[in-house]
Structures are given as C-alpha cells and as structure tokens.
Amino acid sequence: MREQALLRHIYDRSAPLAGFPGIVQGPGDDCAVVNIQSPVLLKVDQVIEGRHFVEGTLLDLVARKAMARPLSDIAAMAGRPAYALAAAILPMGFPQARADELFDALSRWALHWGCPLVGGDIAVAHGVLALSISIVGHVHPTRGPVYRHGAVAGDEVFVTGALGGSLDAVTGMGKHLSFEPRLAEGAWLAETLGARLHAMMDISDGLGIDAGRLAERSGVGIQIDAGSVPLSHGVASVDHAVRDGEDYELLFTVSPGALPARGECPGGCAFTRVGKVLAGHGASLKKGDALEDITGAGFEHRG
Amino acid sequence: MREQALLRHIYDRSAPLAGFPGIVQGPGDDCAVVNIQSPVLLKVDQVIEGRHFVEGTLLDLVARKAMARPLSDIAAMAGRPAYALAAAILPMGFPQARADELFDALSRWALHWGCPLVGGDIAVAHGVLALSISIVGHVHPTRGPVYRHGAVAGDEVFVTGALGGSLDAVTGMGKHLSFEPRLAEGAWLAETLGARLHAMMDISDGLGIDAGRLAERSGVGIQIDAGSVPLSHGVASVDHAVRDGEDYELLFTVSPGALPARGECPGGCAFTRVGKVLAGHGASLKKGDALEDITGAGFEHRG
C-alpha cells in the first residue's frame, strides 16, 4: 500500500465534486474550502475494528457505519449534513485494492447522505483498522438546533423506531451495521413541531443511560413506561431495549399533546410515546407499580 | 479508564468555552454549534504512535504535534483557525490520569492557537495511541485562500525558516515535535503580497516531493538552487533539506521582485528565495551545472 497511490485514486475519484454546490476546493490542496451558512453543526465520531465492528466485516458496511454514526448526531440536532472529512488508520499490509474499495465506499455513503467527502488523511500503522469522520452540518432553518437541555417537567417522551438487539454479539451483525441515521425524521419533527419540540438526542449507548443524560442536561427526571417501549423484532424483554445500545434512534421530548401516542414520520418510521418528564432527576423504568432506576443502564465503555 | 469519567472531566473543563465568541454550544451535546463566516477551510490530520511519535513521548508534545499538523495546513492556505474537533483512540489500560493529561494538553494547545476544542470522541481499543484532529478555519479576509495551483512560470520560489533534520531517527526528538505552524507568517504574506502571492503549501514530506506536488498542481516546473536552501542547525547537506521531511515550513511562489531574496516576517521567522518557477514539469535541484530530478524526493509512506 503506497499512500501516494491511494491519494491519487482519491483525487481522481473526487473530480466530480468540482461541480458540487458549495465546494470551492475539494481534496488535493492543503485544506478544503467550502461555503456554508452560520451557525454550523460540528461532530466527530469514529469506528474501530474490534470495538465497533468485528474483523472480516464487509468494508462497505464499515464505511457505512463510520458515516452513519456522526450523522445520527447531526439528526439528533435536527440538522442537515453538508460536508465530511475522513481520517483512516490502515493496518500494515492492508492491500491497495482494499484501501481503494474502502475509500470508494466512504465516498459513496457520504454522497448518499448529502455530505461529500472534501478532505481526509490516510496513515498506515501498527494496529487495527480505524476511521474517524468529521461532519459539518446546517442547523434546521426555522427551528434551529435542538439540544438535550430543553426538556421540562410535563413533557411527553418519544422515541423513533424500535429498540434493542442491535448488536448481535455472536455474529457481530445486526442493526448496528445497517441503521438509518434519522436525518429526515429529525428534520420533520423540527419542521412540524417547531418550538414544541423541546429536547432531542440519539440513543447510542442504551435508552437508560441516554435518557439519564438528557434528564441530567435538562435538570429533570424521565420516567419510561416499560409497556410502551417499542421492541425490535426478536427482542423479548424491555430490559434489552433499555440496555443493549447501538440503536441510533431519536429520543425526544415534546409539549403535552403535540403528537399522538403513536404515529409515523413521512417515509414510514414509527414514533412512539414511551414516558414523561417529571421534576426531579435521573431516568426510571415503570413496570406496573415498581420503579427501577435505569439512569446508568446501557453500554458503559471501559478500557 | 472509564470513558464516562473522562467525558465528565472534558465537560467540566470545557465550561469556560461558554464565553468564547462564536461558540453557541460546546462539548456535551450531540454536536457543537458554532458561528463562522463563509467560505471556511476544513482540514483533518492525525498523529499515531510509532508513526508520528515514538512510545514514551511526553503527552504534551504528542498533543502539541496533533494540533500543529493540521494547523500547518491552515497556515499554508493563509488561513486562521477557528474551531477544533478531536478523536482519540486510547490503548487498553491507558490510565485515567494520563487520559485527563492528554485532553488537558490538547485543550490548552487548541486555545493557544486560537481554535478551541468544541467536540470530540474517545474510544479505548486494542492498538496504539492515535489522535485525529479536524480544524475549521477562516480564509484570509482580503487575499482569500492561497492554493497550490497558482504558480506561473517566472515566479520566484521561497521557503520560511530552515529545512532538514527535523526527525532525529535515533531519539525520535527534534523539530517535528516542536515546530511552530506558520500561521502568522502565512497570514502576513497574504496581507503584504495580496495577489502577488501566487501559490503556497506546507513542506511535510520533504522539499523535493512537496515542490513536485506544487509544480504538478500548477502545471509548471520548479527549479531549486542547491546553494540557496537554508539548512537547519546541524544539517550538513542540502540533500537532507530536500529529503528529510517533517519541516512544516511554508513553500510559496511570488511575482518576480515581490520580496527580497532574504528577509524576516514579523516575529523573526526568516524567508529565503530558493529557486524559480519554469515552464515544464517536476522539481529539480540545481547544483552548479548539474540538474537533479527531486520530484519524488522525500518521505514516501508505505505500509
């Protein structure tokens, strides 16, 4: 693998970007130069072999997840992606053809979600395959950015899609490699609800831990009704939905009555009311008369 | 190392950013939200243990180099840095105190160069320490971005500072860990020379290979005069200056007579005329009557 050869491949394939609106200078110079309207959203996220995907995962799915993870955060602000930067660490001996395939997949998924790759860095090093993707995005034109800290007591709590079982530990497959960043849904909620959409985030580590984060940032408590949580196909217990993580669905709070308890966003993604915002703190799961503290329930990263 | 604990450390230390002009939302939400004027510069670069620094390098110097590398590219466009994002891969077992130290150093160097860290991601994984830094920057307000492709035959070729010997292979120390990104110099050249500053880039892989790149992008040839190349202290031969790499000095071309053959930028960094732009292609080194092709001379990354 010669980095120069791969860079040339990248520059050659990037030629079509010259006509992309907003791109003054794409890959090939010291920096990219782009047009964008202020304020902007900034996000970086990464995927690493052995941590976010197992060895042997199709490069197309690795590239897809690398792009989709930070895009899920753009969605959680009700934003729209604009440009992407990619940094890759390739293991020693990674074949040139595979490197080309990886770049092509990154480039294709970036365009698929409307944020062309305008720059990047590639390094060959001892270690595993790792990708870090930075996204620059637009805020919603009328609602503006939707933060985690806007929830108030009395709000109703919703999620998009269904939860649990995203990471099949046995095969390493599952929704975590194929989830759809909820960009259209986040934007639609902001458009439709405006100021009645109070707070939003994406569920990456588990409903428990993430609801706990939203509650903490907002200075409120969140109570989830166990019977209301939509479970992914094959998930038998709400405990999985609360703890499994890697769902990349939206968790959001709205003014009472702003949405029906169940419905669909345009495009067919479901939304479901799963609980309410209370004065207090932390996240709890209501099972009949029992109340379980789930503030820290989810995937806690340790090393 | 618990990522949650480190994230809390980061959020706590990021509180002062709330008063930083332009930052609407700093670390702690799904994305950062910042104000910036279009067009903007975008750059990502990375440093990886064993590749860009040796094991045991002071974390402060690792953090410094991680920030300085992409900032050198911002300088090479005559830009001004505005915001930074950091993604870190920490080896398994990396102690919490060292992780805190690394983040504090990144944060301090980011502020030092005027581009506060507004977001990041941390993952613990099998492998070596790796940092990827993305920078969002302003273009020069009057000259605009200075590209690699603006050189024309008849231009004079200059470099800032002195070249060679940046990477001491024995100790791993040297200028590559302590270089100053030429932000002030790049901006001063753009301010002073305006449209007479035709093309610019930073020298990261070696004067030969980088002059070759600038020549290729501009569709011209560059001839370097061996006797004119300023050598770093302790560098005995121009061949090192041409090939060693990791100099992070500026290479730029200007209209004939726009600058004296030697001088100083405000702040004391030297600039030196080292050659000329000719019709043709590639980079060559003129030693007396001999002409040596140095188009590919420098550090070619292979894996």
Image (cartoon, coloured by chain):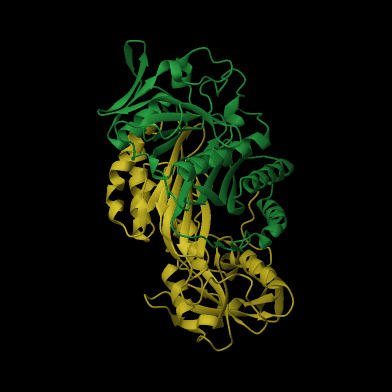
Chain colours: A yellow, B green
Q: Where is residue B222 in the image (x, y as percent from the top left)?
A: 33, 27
Q: In this view, does A64 lie to the left or right of B89?
A: left
**Quadrant position of residue A233:** bottom left
| Count of labels in the image | 0
Name the quadrant of the C terminus of chain A.
Answer: top right
Q: Which residue occupies 27% across, 35% down?
A: B219
Name the quadrant of the N terminus of chain A.
Answer: top left
Q: Is residue B9 left or right of residue A260?
A: right
Furthest toward the left, the residue is B280
Residue A54 shows in this picture: no
**Quadrant position of residue A181:** bottom left
* Front position in the image: B299 or B6: B299
Q: Which residue occupies 41% across, 60% down?
A: A82
Furthest toward the top, the residue is B289
Give above or below for B35 relative to B202. Answer: below
Give above or below for A231 relative to A275. Answer: above
Give above or below for A216 relative to B118. Answer: below
* Front position in the image: A135 or A184: A135
Q: Where is residue B281 in the image (x, y as percent from the top left)?
A: 27, 28
Q: In this view, does B9 lie to the left or right of A254?
A: right
Q: Is residue A298 left or right of residue A141?
A: right
* Front position in the image: B106 or A21: A21
* Front position in the image: B36 or A234: B36
Q: Which residue occupies 58% across, 60% down?
A: A205
Q: Where is residue B168 in the image (x, y as percent from the top left)?
A: 57, 20
Residue B266 shows in this picture: yes
Q: Where is residue A91 in the image (x, y as percent from the top left)?
A: 46, 34
Q: Which residue occupies 52% across, 70% down?
A: A250
Furthest toward the bottom, the residue is A257
